Amino acid sequence: MLHFLRSSIILAFMSLSFTANAQSKAAYNKEIKDWCAKRVQALKAADGWLNLVGLFWLHEGINPFGSDPGQQIVFPYKDLPGDAGYFARKGNTITLAVKNTDRIQIDGKPIQEALVFDTAITKAPVMSYGSLQWTIIQRGEKIGIRLRNLQAPTVSIFKGTQRYPTNIAWKVKATLVPPTEPTYIAITNVLGQTSQLPSAGKLEFTIGQKKYSLDALLEGEELFVLFADATNGATTYGSGRFMYAPKPGAEGTTILDFNKAFNPPCAFTRYATCPLPPRQNHLPIAVTAGEKNYGHH
């Protein structure tokens, strides 16, 4: 009788453990599924990466724009006048002057001439015409127009990127080793420009009984990691991928979830200016988790 009771207890415990593990796996799969849905939503949003249709760097002086193919800056939108006006650059100051239309707006209000970029402006004005929207961006010495079409077909046809199967083994615990003194990470972008960004520290973790590390940047209450691995150029984007991790608590540990590794904007458009993973963040292993490559950019 005692043997029977022991067997029953063991079987019940095993059943509960199996159910708990199944529920845990189901909950994690749902977490990743929800994360992917939000990722698609963000890419398709008005400020996402799928609707970019142009990037035009401005030179000093007058930069005419319009839909005429002979213009210096051609906005691919046939309803826009062929000669719609010009952008005047004077150092780090950009002024927009409009002509031949009263439909160009800034933040929803029609304008004829306005200052649209200056180092003192804290929020970039959003200019628009029909489904076109554009803002001024600065990358080092370069200042340009980032053009979007909110009705771009690249948005409507996008259903998501291919992914590796979700594998909880790629969700690993990491320890952040902060620098003992202010340290900077050299980050180069696709334009060849290099910036020195403050380091949040080095994330140390173990995969397959081997230790690895990745340098991290602090972005708000999260750590931002740019990394490359042995899948790049084959199944994943050639230059690497990005990943966020929660900012560590007092114990100094966080979670690196490679199932949430995602493509940089340059995987979706040629009009982005993506940062590249620093050399020390090139992992010698194949990270078979997260987003696979998309498109041909």
Image (tube, rainbow, N blue to C red):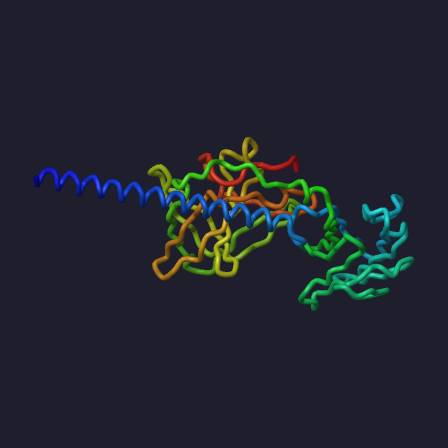
Residue at horizontal 37 percent and vertical 54 percent from the top: 253
Give the answer, above or below, for where 242 lies relative to 109: above
* Residue 6 falls in image quadrant: top left
Q: Outermost residue toward the left?
A: 1
Q: How many marks?
A: 0
Q: Outermost residue toward the right?
A: 100
Q: Outermost residue toward the bottom?
A: 120
* Residue 179 falls in image quadrant: bottom left
Residue at horizontal 80 percent and vertical 59 percent from the top: 89
Image location of residue 79, percent across then percent down: 86, 49
Image location of residue 125, percent across then percent down: 73, 63
Give the answer, above or below, for where 288 lies relative to 181: above
Q: Nearer the viewer, residue 115 or 19?
A: 19
Q: Which part of the image, by quadrant, shows the C terminus? A: top right
Q: Nearer the viewer, residue 239 or 83?
A: 83
Q: Is residue 83 left or right of residue 4?
A: right
Q: Which part of the image, by quadrant, shows the N terminus? A: top left
Image location of residue 98, percent across then percent down: 87, 60
Residue at horizontal 61 percent and vertical 41 percent from the top: 159
Q: Outermost residue toward the front?
A: 1
Q: Nearer the viewer, residue 14 or 238?
A: 14
Image location of residue 139, percent across then percent down: 67, 54
